[in-house]
Image (cartoon, rainbow, N blue to C red):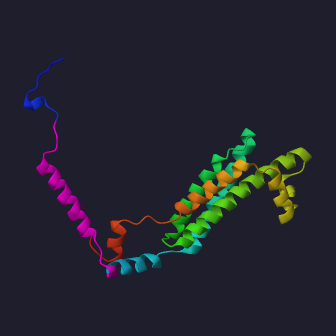
Amino acid sequence: MSNDLTPENLPKQDAPQQRMENEVREEEQAAEFALTEDEAQRAMAFLREEQNLLMGVIYGLFAALAGAAVWAGVTIATDFKIGWMAVGIGFLVGIAVRAGGKGIDQVFGVAGAVLSLVGCALGNLLTVAWFVSQEYGVPVGEVLSGLDLESAIELMSATFELTDVLFYGLAVYFGYRYAFRELGADDFNRALGRAM
């Protein structure tokens, strides 16, 4: 091992001049994107016009149904309820609401949260219906068609565990959190008709 301490072999550090140049470049980039109050309001109005709550809800509903089916399928296949599936449903629903709705307003987060909860509850209900159908030897469709709201709540509460609160809460959080469109400089530039 060589102990050669010549300047060529010493670790390189940013010179103060290089650091200052980097900081100036970052400040210039931030200033280039700075918006006046009027520009920000015009851009947000343009971006709000692109929102589509109905499409966000439709995409989110399909994601909730798909997530519920996967949750039920995994639980039935493993004979074990995996609570983390709720987090997956929340994430999936939130992304779907964002993709369909392009939303920036709070209502999109609320839609994502509610649909995530619906997906989780439906996944549990499908699972319970499957096990009831197996125990009594009747088709799942017959079990589901025989359920009214009161008996569905009864079935769900019979299988309810305290950890369900945690996982449902996480699903609601992720459904809300990921339902919003992430805005960047390109979105604002496009909204203001600036060249990109």
Q: Is residue 2 above or below residue 105?
A: above
Q: Residue at x 86, y 60 (%)?
A: 151
Q: Main secondary structure of the magenta part?
A: helix
Between 173 and 63, the residue placed more toward the observer is 173
Q: Going by the image, does 158 lie left or right of 39?
A: right
As drawn, the residue found furthest toward the right would be: 136
Which picture quadrant has residue 44? Answer: bottom left
Between 163 and 178, the residue placed more toward the observer is 163
Q: Residue 128 in the image: x percent, y percent?
A: 80, 50
Q: Going by the image, does 37 lie left or right of 86?
A: left
Q: Residue 175 in the image: x percent, y percent?
A: 58, 60
Q: Is residue 45 above or below residue 71?
A: below
Number of marks: 0
- The residue range painted magenta reads 12-38
Whether residue 92 can be seen here:
no
Q: Residue 98 in the image: x percent, y percent?
A: 52, 65
Q: Going by the image, does 119 lie left or right of 145?
A: left
As drawn, the residue found furthest toward the top would be: 1
Q: Residue at x 29, y 78 (%)?
A: 36
Q: Quadrant of the C terminus?
A: bottom left
Which picture quadrant has residue 186? Answer: bottom left
Q: Quadrant of the N terminus?
A: top left
Q: Residue at x 9, y 31 (%)?
A: 8
Q: Is residue 117 above or below residue 17?
A: below
Q: Residue 113 in the image: x percent, y percent?
A: 61, 63
Q: Residue at x 16, y 44 (%)?
A: 14
Between 160 and 104, the residue placed more toward the observer is 160
Residue 21 is a magenta residue: yes
Q: Going by the image, does 144 lie left or right of 35?
A: right
Which picture quadrant has residue 81? Answer: top right
Whether residue 111 can be seen here:
yes
Residue 160 is a magenta residue: no
